[in-house]
Amino acid sequence: MKKIKYPDSEMMAMDLADILAAELNGILNTKERVTLVVPGGTTPGPVFDILSGVRLDWSRVNILLTDERWVPEDDPRSNTRLVREHLLVDRAAEATFIPLYAPIKTPEEALADLSKPIGPLLPIDVLVLGMGLDMHTASLFPGADNLEAAMADDAPILMPMRAKGAGGPRVTLTAPVLKGAMSTHVVYIGKAKNKALKKALKINDPLRAPISAFLKGATAHWTPHK
Ligand SMILES: O=C1O[C@H](COP(=O)(O)O)[C@@H](O)[C@H](O)[C@H]1O
């Protein structure tokens, strides 16, 4: 794993957006379409704000979330809402967004329909992961009901997930899908999360520290300051 430390979150957002744009552009020179997978949560908004304005052929870009909270799109907790407001705007409005949410009562009922369009878009070309203080990434939480199954090599593309700190049901891309990414970036803010990442590297157990499963060959981008 390579780690890049930035002086502040503005510098981090600018640099990471530049790196992602360069990777996407490079891949678009060799392939007809590119698949970009991004996290939700509180960290990536400023990266999306810059990335959405970069010049590239967005009409050939598929965008998916790593995971979604099972809430309507207008809910402040919705990761889809974050992507729609900060990434699928400006030049990036031409990208194709593949949702991980449907207005159906439980994720289990929607899983087959949500999974169907994802298979043909794999492997992921460019993956950006977030991370929680508890070392979760996507919605792969330590102690979650389906964690072991989602970490297995034969896991389906998408799984429902319920966990103590998750604030309700969620869906998440599973380990084999995320591990298959050609390029992986992890982004986080704060010294506490940096400690958590170091701890995850030490523990190196995907069930206790899910992020540790995706760090080999990844680049971590972090700043101690907001
Ligand atoms: O719940 C989630 O948490 C992680 C980390 O989010 P952050 O707010 O601490 O940046 C995020 O990567 C994931 O997509 C999200 O659903």
Image (cartoon, helix red, strand yellow):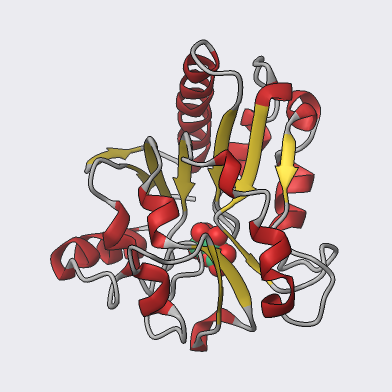
Q: Residue at x 29, y 66 (%)?
A: 196
In the image, farthest residue toward the top: 29
* Residue nearer the viewer, 6 or 134: 134
Give the side of residue 111 with respect to residue 202, left or right.
right
- Quadrant in the rendering for residue 120: top right
Query: What is the number of callouts on the image?
Result: 0
Q: Which residue is drawn at the image coordinates 28% and 60% (left, top)?
A: 213
Q: Residue at x 21, y 60 (%)?
A: 198
Q: Quadrant of residue 180?
A: top left
Where does the image place residue 74, in percent across and percent down from the top left? Answer: 85, 64
Instruction: Specify whether 74 is left or right of 65.
Output: right
- Compared across the picture, whether 226 is left or right of 151 comes to right
Please report the residue visible at 53 percent of the width from the left and 16 percent of the height from the top: 25
Does 177 sit above or below residue 58? below
Image: 192 above or below 86: below
Residue 224 seen in this snapshot: no
**Along the line of sight, which residue is nearer the eye, 81 or 171?**
171
